Amino acid sequence: MTKLILETDNSWTKTKVKEAIFTEIAILKNAISRTTRKIEAFRQKYNALDTSSLFGKVDDMELIEWEGEEEILKELKTNLEALEEIEFEY
């Protein structure tokens, strides 16, 4: 859990900080959706759930891209979880 303590009497500042975090959450959710679609396209194209059985059988650059998308997805999910667990205290 992350607790964000914001000490200010300015309600505009409180609102903007919270909005900025919520905006970033929305951006991350969109990025997760796009990345998931890319991964699903690879899975459908090669009829496989992962790349391990495909090396040497298909275009290695596509497999590298697929693995890269998997890594990006993990990072995006980690970042999203970190922001979603923030508790605001004023």
Image (tube, rainbow, N blue to C red):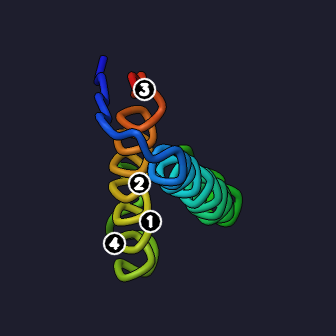
Whole-angstrom CA distance, mark 1 to mark 3, is: 37 Å
Q: Pointer 2 and pointer 1: residues touching (CB < 8 Å)?
A: yes
Amino acid under label 3? Phe
Residue found 35% across the figure and 78% down from its top? 60
Q: Which residue is mark 4?
A: 64
Q: Which residue is mark 1?
A: 66
Residue found 41% across the figure and 51% down from its top? 76
- In primary-sequence order, the first of circles 3 and 2 is 2
Whole-angstrom CA distance, mark 2 to mark 1, is: 6 Å
Residue 70: percent from left, percent from top: 41, 54
Q: Which residue is mark 2?
A: 70
Q: Pointer 4 and pointer 1: residues touching (CB < 8 Å)?
A: yes
Which residue is most to the top?
1
Element type where label 2 sits in the image: helix
Amino acid under label 2? Glu
Residue found 30% across the figure and 22% down from its top? 3
Q: Is residue 5 above or below residue 33?
A: above
